[in-house]
Amino acid sequence: MATYKEIFGTNIQVLASDPANPVQGQVWYNSTSNVVKGLAATTSGAWATGTSMNTANSQFGSNGTRSSAIGYGGPTNNTESWNGSAWTEVSDLNTARFTNAGAGADNTSSLSIGGETPAGPKTSNTESWNGTSWTEVNNLNTTRAQLGGIGIITAALAFGGQDTSSPGVTAVNESWNGTSWTEVNDLNTARRRLASAGTSTAALASGGSTGSNSNANESWNGSTWTELNDLNTAREQIRSAGTTTNALAFGGNVSPRAQTEDWNGTSWTEVNDLNVGGGRVGRSGGYSDAFAFGRNTPGGNTADVEEWTGAGSPLTVTFTDS
């Protein structure tokens, strides 16, 4: 029988500790634990518990990555910034509100869009975050809350939501150029409390409520919305991360409120659920490294944080003789 060296042309490395940056397919012997290990790829995605926020919260705007995220607004009106290892409370929004949308690249660059004020009225207010403080900028053309938002502070999109009319579900879509909002082509299905993913020129609008739970799914190409295959579970208060070709949708108002679905550009597949079910979750990150923070559960708002590791991500495994 051929040996490992004869097949691959080298001996298995003997190391006192696991390598800091192994490559997929690499195999080594850990002389401290006396086991053979290797770097494989995960076969399915899963959520893992992360570091909790300082304050339980939900229904807030959010944006960023797994290592640089920010949440702002909600019933507490707190702004919390995540640097990859800890949460820090920073300056609050100028206009206290919840059910606002968010856009931005990281925890130094954000837009808070629309929402509802504690006294009840909806707002068209837009504020820009520079990493230190919030500045009021030009308002939305259509006052609304519970809307979807995506993009960066120089190129964002705000769509759907609940406006001031009756019954208050709107399909309005507005584009932000870094200075002002312009009305562009509307969603095909008017809805509120929907999920948003992608960019200002390639966005995904999923789920929400038309007055009842919706599983509608639409893609924006920079000019128009196109109806695509629906979510498996119709729900509102849902969040998503990723792109128009690879996205993750999670949480919502349907028991157990933890459903997670994977979008491959064509259809949705149910995958591993959140560990703590809830709706109105803060979200950041991408398809393979989504970050979910805060949420509303039947018991109230929580500070729970979860990190998603997608299928195909690196995974260290230990080999046994069984």
Image (cartoon, grey):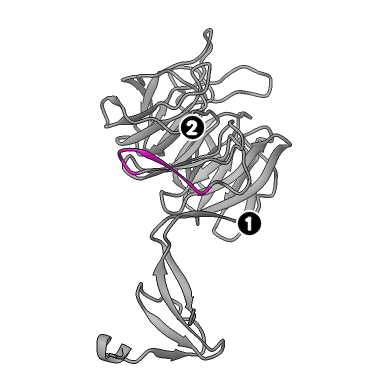
Which residues make up the magenta segment? Answer: 264-272
Residue most toward the top? 166
Say which element carries label 1.
loop
Q: Identify residue type, mark 2.
A: Thr
Give the mark toward the camera: 1 or 2: 2
- Residue 93 magenta-highlighted: no
**Closest to the observer, 118 or 208:** 208
Q: Identify residue type, mark 1.
A: Thr
Question: At which x and y percent is residue 239?
Answer: 50, 37
- The residue sitting at 29% across, 90% down in the picture is 1
In this rendering, the answer to whether 21 lies above or below 104 is below
Question: At which x and y percent is residue 38?
Answer: 42, 77
Measure the C-alpha gap from mark 1 to mark 2.
Answer: 29 Å
**Closest to the observer, 182 or 149:** 149
Residue holding disc 2: 233
- The residue sitting at 57% across, 28% down in the picture is 99
Left or right of 12? Residue 49 is right
- The residue sitting at 49% across, 46% down in the picture is 284
Say whether residue 132 is visible. Answer: no
Say which element carries label 2.
loop
In this rendering, the answer to whether 218 lies above or below 25 is above
Give the mark nearer the N terminus: 1 vs 2.
Answer: 1
Q: Which mark is residue 242?
A: none
**Closest to the observer, 241 or 137:** 241
Residue most toward the right? 299
In this rendering, the answer to whether 4 lies above or below 196 is below
Tell me if mark 2 has few (under 14), some (14-19) or many (20+) residues whose alpha carbon lies within 10 angstroms of its own. some
Q: Are marks 1 and 2 in contact (CB under 8 Å)?
A: no
Residue holding disc 1: 51
Question: At which x and y percent is residue 64?
Answer: 47, 47
